[in-house]
Image (cartoon, rainbow, N blue to C red):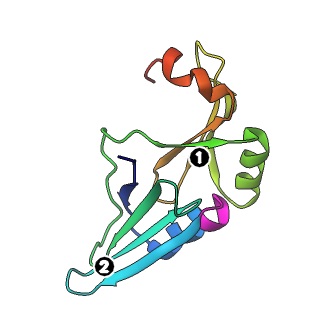
Amino acid sequence: MRFDHTMIRVFDLDRSLRFYTDVMGMHLIRKKDYPHGKFTLAFVGYSEEQAQLELTHNWEQQEPYNLGSGYGHIAIIVEDIHAICAQIKEKGGKIPRPPGPMKGSTSLLAFVEDPDGYKIELIQKGAAAGYATDAQPT
């Protein structure tokens, strides 16, 4: 078995695609319209061999989605968290939590927010090794 993808619903597909490709550096893997169901699926990611993010756009959605209290975040391991955050900020991305250590841990992380308000956790490569074992829910 392998992890394939995570799906989130997006209000404005073009805006979300620009964010995930231009700001986060992902690639559009595939996109398909489903006229019978009035929705579009777009898959973005860093490669076809890795887990991807499915952006689901329901054509008749009139208002932005309520994210609810159950959603946490998407996590991405990065080579240089400070450089990536600088690039994201330069491209207009929102960084509500700049790079820094996780409370009670040596893990270095930051949070980015997409146009729909979804949180994306950036984890410094190397610091991620102990992340799962010493992390406390936040």
Q: Nearer the viewer, residue 99 or 124?
A: 124
- Report helix, strand or loop for mark 2: loop
Is residue 32 depicted above or below 28 in this figure? Answer: below
Q: Nearer the viewer, residue 122 or 27?
A: 27
* Residue that appears at 50% across and 17% down: 133
Count of numbered marks: 2
- In the image, the segment drawn in magenta is 21-26
**Residue identified by numbered label 1:** 112
Q: Is residue 87 left or right of residue 24?
A: right
Is residue 124 depicted above or below 26 in this figure? Answer: above
Q: Is residue 52 left or right of residue 61?
A: right
Q: Is residue 62 left or right of residue 79?
A: left
- Report helix, strand or loop for mark 1: strand
* Residue that appears at 63% across and 57% down: 24
Residue 127 sits inside the magenta stretch? no
**Residue 124's spot in the image, x, y percent?**
68, 34
Q: Nearer the viewer, residue 53 or 113?
A: 53
**Residue 84's spot in the image, x, y percent?**
73, 48
Q: Nearer the viewer, residue 69 or 28?
A: 28
Category of crowding for the residue at label 2, using alpha-carbon neighbours closer than 10 angstroms: few (below 14), some (14–19), many (at least 20): some
* Extreme residue in the bottom direction: 35
Is residue 16 depicted above or below 134 in this figure? Answer: below
**Residue identified by numbered label 2:** 59
Amino acid tagged 1: Val
Amino acid tagged 2: Trp
Q: Which quarter of the figure is the C terminus placed in? A: top left
